[in-house]
């Protein structure tokens, strides 16, 4: 009965609102260590929905589990950068010390150990989350020491011996994470950023004038797609509705991205200021920040910033004494699903559903959260909005290139001497970037994360901007010692894990792509396989339901185009007439063993091949 | 000189060959254009010379299938996979789904000959006569074994599809088939 009371209490805490399913489930996962079938039934009853709907949500997110997890959960980041930095050794060090298999839970339910996709610490890899506490720059030795401390009963938050730079040392964060800000630009990371100057300037203008200012600035969405932000505001404002929403996408799950983490740590006020300006512009009174589960350690701090803003009259009722302007922001914690960074999937998740993308159109600006017009923007975009209102459209549009205005935050990691966050004006070429970050002997620059563009040496002259290499800011640098096909295989593995499974081209197609890439890696492919890879990639791109599927084959197509020699060096010419990859001897092995006899056709007897006479 | 056609049924059910007979009286017209070489239609069992077109029904489930398919590839100018089994493995390929076993092939044989309900096998033997070709570790589609030039889906492809395919191939002008006659089941 105790469980029943706990579950009911959790549901009640969120007013038995099934739209708040994520919060209810987080509550249960944290208190009970799992969400078992019994709990799901009670949740379904209390929230007046079906059990299968609850189960659908529980099984969708990797941070929720049906099986009992350990009291302490260690999640080792399995990003490609972390892998190159030795995450496998870290995981096995934890595994040996704690006596828990990777992917398992100790029999006394004390420890769980598992891999998790990028946790946004690639510049301080390898890293892990221990009950949500980020532990960075791990070595096998430090992993062993950490494990020993955990066995002694040290609480995960006490594992942090030395806190990181900037606000990472704030008493509500106290994290060992470092910002690693390598280059400050004038828009976002300059040291004279005000907490509310943008909002104050915006409130002097009418809503249409605010939108005009944003349009004039030429600001485009910083998430990667690059949609003009002012235009988005205008569309949302012009859609007739009694309610509109402002949503901030702080679910940066793209492998190798971490710049939003730095903004959330150092520029939280600017973000909330930008969201409030957006609310004023489109006529909204409710905002939500969808914070990825991996950044839960920032939650208390962000809540405190919101509280401060409320008491300063920058949030809540009658903001800045404007009678007709009420706006407040709540933070929704995600639960480990990459796909929720896609705006329509994010909205599904906010509505208490599985984080599956919705059909578009209608676009969120017409029918978004709860069916109401919704503006969804990246953390960086909202921060830019606030700075534009503070300093004017002309100031902003003077920076960058003709089509891409302003600066861009880049998260740079991998084989370079100065990984971290860089704020640079748009228009930087890849080779300039490589010099800036101290990268030598680079063979691949992966721009835009797993689904982005794989840039090879011959294309290092390309520019980072909307019209050339558009990116949300994830840049991974790979040196000459890295295996191109291994990287492609990693990305495909990532996408097959993170596909929501709704549409077949993405769910099945990516698996087939990976099978074929494996065949190439084993030296069993021929030219026809490359044709197959291209054709299938094209089909997946054309027919997938959302951006995840349509960008998943990019690494395949790019690598074939940029590194043809890598592929051709894996091709094998065969003279036996069989298709590449077919090995008759291997195909017969098991049969020979079971039948305890040799082949009539393919096993030579006394030096000559027997035949059936064909 | 007349063109030559060879046909074979590998791991198939002969349904595609039955379907070939569904071209009905057009078979007379076909024989004006070509003659059958190695084929069950005329019971010629060996290639006696090069053929223009080879039709292959069924995928490969044993070594003899592989051997035959390879000889088709070596002796036919154009090789066409006909029907679901040749293209995707069809019904036989279901045994490839036994993959969570340490010994999938052994499991398959035991299920087929020993353990299934309704199996009457008083000697409890799994057929293993030396004359039986060895079974492969899994069922392979034709394209996995040799290069195929065309694949015609359908279970079976209709007589019309086979008629159009053959006449176009013999005329040297196969440029796809009308959508409405191609079926996948």
Image (tube, coloured by chain):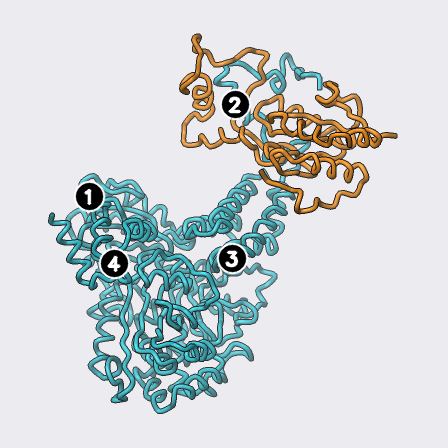
Quadrant of the rendered structure where residue B145 is? Answer: top right
Residue located beneath label 1 in the image: A109
Is residue A139 visible to the viewer in this orientation of the structure? no
The residue positioned 74% from the left and 23% from the top of the image is: B38
Residue A207 location, x and y as percent? Answer: 39, 86
Instruction: Return the residue nearer the eye: A157 or A19.
Output: A19
Mark positioned earlier in the residue sequence (1 or 4): 1
Have a look at marks 3 and 2 and say if they share a chain: yes
Q: Secondary structure at mark 3?
A: helix
Q: Is residue A537 left or right of residue A22?
A: right
- Disc 1 packing (10 Å; few <14; some 14–19; many ≥20): some
Residue A451 location, x and y as percent? Answer: 49, 58
Query: Dot 3 falls on which chain?
Result: A
Have a look at marks 3 and 4 and say if they share a chain: yes
Q: Secondary structure at mark 4?
A: strand
Mark positioned earlier in the residue sequence (3 or 4): 4
Residue located beneath label 3 in the image: A550
Q: CA distance from mark 3 to mark 4?
A: 34 Å
Q: CA distance from mark 3 to mark 2?
A: 40 Å
Of circles 1 and 4, the one toward us is 1
Residue located beneath label 2 in the image: A589
Residues at marks 1 and 3 touching, judged by CB atoms closer than 8 Å: no
Residue located beneath label 4 in the image: A133
- The colour chain B appears in is orange
Q: CA distance from mark 4 to mark 2?
A: 50 Å
Q: Secondary structure at mark 1?
A: loop
Q: CA distance from mark 1 to mark 4?
A: 19 Å
Of circles 1 and 3, the one toward us is 3
Q: The chain drawn cyan is chain what?
A: A
Quadrant of the rendered structure where residue A175 is? Answer: bottom left
Residues at marks 3 and 4 touching, judged by CB atoms closer than 8 Å: no
Mark positioned earlier in the residue sequence (4 or 2): 4
């Amino acid at each position: 009965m105790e469980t029943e009371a706990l579950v009911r209490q959790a549901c009640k805490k969120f007013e038995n609102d099934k739209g708040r399913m994520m919060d209810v489930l987080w509550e249960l996962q944290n208190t009970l260590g799992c969400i078992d079938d019994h709990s799901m039934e009670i949740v379904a009853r209390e929230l007046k929905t079906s059990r299968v709907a609850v189960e659908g949500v529980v099984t969708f997110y990797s941070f929720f589990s049906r099986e009992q997890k350990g009291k302490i959960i260690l999640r080792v980041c399995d990003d490609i950068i972390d892998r190159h930095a030795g995450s496998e050794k870290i995981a096995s060090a934890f595994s040996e010390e704690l006596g828990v298999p990777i992917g398992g839970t100790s029999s006394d339910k004390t420890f769980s150990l598992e891999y998790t996709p990028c946790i946004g610490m690639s510049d301080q890899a390898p890293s892990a989350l221990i009950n949500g506490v980020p532990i960075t720059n791990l070595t096998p030795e430090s992993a062993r020491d950490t494990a020993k401390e955990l066995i002694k009963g040290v609480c995960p938050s006490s594992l942090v011996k030395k806190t990181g730079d900037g606000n990472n040392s704030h008493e509500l964060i106290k994290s060992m994470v470092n910002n690693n800000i390598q280059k400050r630009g004038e828009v976002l990371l300059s040291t004279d950023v005000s907490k509310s100057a943008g909002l104050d300037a915006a409130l002097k203008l009418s809503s249409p004038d605010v939108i005009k200012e944003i349009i004039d600035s030429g600001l485009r969405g910083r998430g990667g797609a690059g949609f003009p932000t002012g235009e988005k505001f205008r569309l949302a404002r012009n859609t007739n509705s009694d309610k509109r929403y402002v949503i901030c996408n702080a679910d940066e799950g793209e492998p190798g991205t971490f710049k939003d983490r730095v903004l959330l740590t150092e520029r939280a006020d600017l973000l909330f200021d930008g969201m409030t300006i957006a609310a004023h512009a489109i006529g909204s009174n409710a905002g939500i920040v969808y914070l990825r589960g991996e950044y839960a350690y920032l939650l208390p701090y962000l809540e405190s910033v919101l509280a401060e803003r409320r008491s300063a009259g920058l949030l809540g009722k009658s903001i800045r004494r404007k009678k007709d302007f009420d706006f407040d922001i709540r933070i929704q914690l995600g639960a480990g699903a990459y796909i929720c960074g896609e705006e329509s999937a994010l909205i599904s998740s906010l509505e208490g559903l599985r984080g599956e993308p919705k059909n578009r159109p209608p676009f969120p600006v017409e029918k978004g959260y709860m069916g109401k017009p919704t503006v969804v923007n990246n953390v960086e975009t909202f921060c830019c909005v606030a700075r534009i209102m503070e300093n004017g459209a002309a100031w902003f549009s003077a920076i960058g290139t003709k089509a891409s205005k302003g600066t861009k935050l880049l998260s740079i990691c991998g084989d370079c001497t100065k990984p971290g966050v860089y704020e640079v004006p748009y228009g930087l070429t890849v080779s300039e970037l490589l010099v800036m970050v101290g990268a030598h002997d680079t063979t691949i620059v992966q721009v835009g994360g797993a689904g982005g563009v794989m840039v090879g040496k011959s294309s290092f002259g390309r520019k980072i901007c909307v019209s050339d290499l558009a990116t949300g800011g994830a840049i991974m640098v790979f040196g000459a010692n890295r295996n191109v096909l291994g990287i492609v295989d990693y990305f495909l593995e990532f996408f097959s894990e993170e596909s929501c499974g709704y549409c077949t081209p993405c769910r099945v197609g990516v698996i087939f792509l990976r099978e074929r890439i494996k065949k190439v890696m084993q030296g069993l492919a021929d030219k026809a396989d490359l044709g197959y890879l291209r054709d299938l990639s094209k089909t997946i791109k054309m027919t997938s339901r959302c951006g995840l599927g349509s960008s998943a084959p990019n690494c395949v197509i790019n690598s074939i185009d940029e590194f043809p020699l890598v592929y051709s060096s894996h091709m094998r010419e065969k003279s036996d007439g069989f298709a590449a990859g077919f090995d008759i001897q291997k195909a017969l092995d098991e049969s020979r063993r079971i039948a305890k006899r040799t082949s009539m056709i393919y096993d030579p007897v006394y030096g000559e091949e027997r035949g059936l006479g064909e | 000189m007349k063109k030559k056609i060879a046909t074979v049924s590998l791991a198939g059910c002969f349904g595609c060959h039955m379907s070939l007979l569904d071209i009905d009286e057009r078979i007379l017209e076909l024989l004006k254009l070509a003659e059958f070489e190695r084929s069950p239609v005329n019971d010629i069992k060996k290639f006696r010379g090069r053929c223009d077109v080879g039709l292959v029904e069924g995928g490969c489930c044993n070594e003899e299938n592989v051997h035959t398919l390879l000889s088709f590839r070596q002796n036919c100018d154009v090789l066409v996979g006909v029907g679901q089994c040749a293209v995707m493995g069809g019904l036989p390929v279901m045994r490839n789904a036994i993959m969570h076993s340490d010994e999938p092939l052994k499991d398959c044989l035991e299920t087929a000959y020993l353990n299934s309900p309704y199996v009457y096998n008083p000697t409890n033997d799994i057929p293993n006569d030396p004359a039986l070709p060895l079974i492969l570790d899994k069922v392979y589609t034709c394209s996995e074994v040799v290069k195929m030039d065309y694949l015609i889906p359908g279970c079976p492809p209709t007589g019309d599809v086979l008629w159009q395919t053959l006449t176009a191939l013999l005329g040297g002008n196969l440029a796809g088939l009308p959508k409405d006659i191609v079926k996948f089941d």
